[in-house]
Amino acid sequence: MTLTGFTTSWKSAAVTLALGIVLLAALPSVLDDYTLLQMTIYLVMSVLAVSLGFIWGYSGILCFGQAAFFGLGAYTYAIAVVNMNDSTVPLLLSIVVPALFAAVLGYVIFYGRLSDVYMGVITLTVTLILFNMINSTAGPEWKIGNAPLGGFNGIPAIPPLNWPGNIDETITPRGMFNLSFGVLLAVYAGLRWLIASRIGHVIIAIKENEQRAQLLGYDARAYKLFAFTLGGAIAGLAGCLFANWGAFTSPTIFGLAQSAQIIIWVIVGGLGTLVGPVVGCMLIQWLTTQIGTQQTFNSNLVLGAILVVFVLLVPRGLVPSLGDLLARLFRRRPVEPAEPVGRVEEGRA
Amino acid sequence: MLTIQGLSAGYGAIPVLHHITATIAAGESVGILGHNGMGKTTLLRCLIGALRVTAGSVGFEGHDVTRLAPHARARLGMAYVPQGREIFASLSTLDNLRMGLVKTGERSKDAIDALLAHFPRLKPLLDRPGGSLSGGEQQLLALARALAGKPKLLLLDEPTEGIQPSIIEEIGETLTRLRDELGLTIVLVEQNLDFIATVSQRVLVIKRGQLGAEIPREHLDDLALMSEYTGVHA
Amino acid sequence: MTAGVTPLLQTHDLNVRFGGVHATRDVNFTLAEAELRCVIGPNGAGKSTFFKLLTGQVKPTSGRILFRGKDISKMQPHDPGRLGIGIKTQVPSLFNGLSVWENVWLSARRTNPPKIANDVTRQTLERVGMLADSKAITGTLAHGQRQWVELGVVLAADPPLILLDEPAAGMSDAEVMRTAELILEINRQHALVVVEHDMSFIRMIAKKVTVLHQGQVIREDVPDRIMSDPLVQQIYLGKKAH
């Protein structure tokens, strides 16, 4: 089987999931609590990265404001759990609210047949609007139910997830690690399944050639709306996990920097794959942490340099380029033509 | 004028051309016939430099151009009209033609007028954006633009595709005239046997990436014989 | 045409103007079920524009288009496919990053459950001679092969009306003959409108030819009479009698 055949088949999904499950089971026994905590945030951000990787790489939607859904998920969870105490409904809301928001936004953009440029501009603007809005809610008068929005201070001491129905059994750091890893694997499996289904094929076809897909009778607007909404829901779920990890959320979650980072993770890791964004996210998060421990270089400067290097030298991203390399190593030698076509004539001088 | 020596090329792992060798004299007009997928477009792309060769060389007027970029080959006097037109859709017809003059740096008005004398059909279309022209009109524009740069060698990939019969005749006449009057060297890839017979002095066959023997002119009318040459059976 | 039978396609005084160009002028066009019509005309006569009107890519400035009696003048882009109009465009429009199989499968799968879609895909690929290349990535194929794939994509949806814009372009003589045979075979169950320039090809397939010139229908007749018509020869055919 060719490498391309492998990577798009269920076999590669099975291998990846198996690897993931093994790591999920093994890591908590080898790593200490502090490292597990570090890994958890990488995993949470990976879920966010996968959400953009899906809508951009498979549906061709370059959303500059995936952070908006991420932030909405975090804030929705925080506000809901402060009000409701039991975390079950807040968890669900943290998925539903961003999804609805994405659905409305998506409807306006896709059914209004706005071009890709508008998608970028509108989503970027929306995330900045949310940032500014939430940022200015510092006063005590700004609250939803019992939850003060906190403005630029953010919402501290967010109650963690509890077992449904049992408020006292809250999630532990190890539990968070397991949950985040589990969510990442579940999202990966779900998206791989979707991509292999007819809906997934149509979504990819629309990205390839929207006009031809429409001429075949597929309503491109509906499929793009579905993909965009799903991306928003996944990002929202990541937001909920984020609020749990740090027990804290603030408006910077809606910031330009956050949105840009997600895009960089996907570019570095590899657009067009689901594993790529995860690799890109983890690598850059880890690098950022490492760079942060020394004083010589500003971390943003280093990240910028990395992005430039990647765009110039590894334009397809890490995972696809690695795949190409492996393909070349394992490729069979090219087949020569069966027989010569007759005398090959030398042209007249 | 054009020397091709042991040329091999392909796309990634897939080899397409195998040891192509041919020489084309200045002022000569050569036609290349071939079934789809045999390498006609690949060969032209190698000649203009749009595709890297994996072996062999290309010589143009004594210079080795094998590693030369397309724009450098254009400056030396090679012009290419690709399959699929590739005109600048957002520029007007007139601007498309002017783009062809960039290399020669001529005063555009006189040069354009001289060019339009060969392509009168483009005159009423000068202000329209290239993308709004019909397929056939775009093909004419692509051809005119290539000739605007007064090339010494013209590489044509199926120039009659999508053109109405009367204009095909006109193009044939124009190319023959340019060949005879200005000594234009032409390498023409075509499926239209009438056209290739009109414009070319000799016709070669490309089959599975290899260049075959010259086809005698009298065989061009015989469909059965032609099927034998191209390896395609109806 | 038998009185009382609804034609498959009918246009009434169809006009389209854009950018100062009157691309389609008072076109009245009628096509019966399973009829095969060829449309010829000089470059710029409005042939592709006419097709774009039939697929909703261009909206008429005035006039109506009726498909089986239903007014389709204002269609959404995904309506033609659902109504039963398939088009092979002048420049092949395909999913370049996907394989040949996947291209045709997407067309077959829209109206068929998975197993039948697979069968239809295989049969269609066999019909257009691309089964051996079904795993090839469409963007890497030569131009003529892409034409075959697109024909397969259109056929797999089994539409009652098939529009072919220059199906013989970029094909060798032998392939042109194969295309003609295929079109005649398709015509047994589908109506076809074929735009072409290759007169020998048209002779092989057409019973009736419509001639467009500057957006208008100027002649509609059997091939022989069209080709000996002096006006058609002057504006289109040229000196050689094809």
Image (spheres, coloured by chain):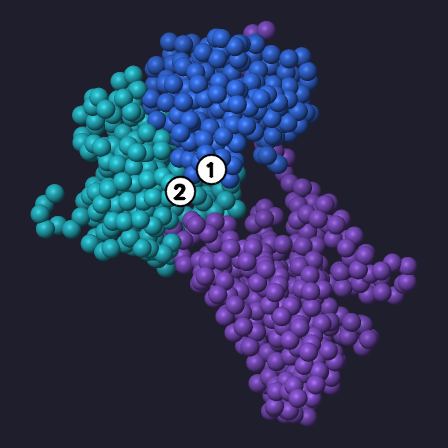
Please provide percent x and percent y for residue B171.
41, 19
Task: Tell me the residue at 47%/66% (across/down).
Answer: A107
Q: Disc 1 vs disc 2: Cβ atoms closer than 8 Å?
A: yes
Please provide percent x and percent y for residue B14.
58, 34
Task: Tell me the residue at 18%/25% (across/down).
Answer: C225
Q: Which chain is cyan?
A: C
Measured Cα–Cα span from mark 1 to mark 2? 10 Å
Q: Residues within 10 Å of mark 1 (few under 14, many from 20)?
A: some
- What residue is pinned by disc 2? C19
Q: Residues within 10 Å of mark 2 (few under 14, many from 20)?
A: few
Describe residue C164's horizontal placement relative to residue B177 as left or right: left
Toward which corner of the image does residue B228 lie, by quadrant? top left
Please identify the quadrant where the N terminus of chain C is shown.
Answer: top left
Colour assignment, chain A: purple
Task: Tell me the residue at 36%/25% (across/down).
Answer: C173
Mark 2 element type: loop
* Residue A335 appears in view: yes
* Residue B161 appears in view: no
Badge 2: chain ID: C
Mark 1 element type: loop
- What residue is pinned by disc 1? B129
Please identify the quadrant where the C terminus of chain C is shown.
Answer: top left
The relative height of residue C191 versus residue A347 in the rendered view (above or below) is below
Q: Which chain is blue?
A: B
Q: Mark 2: which amino acid? A: Gly
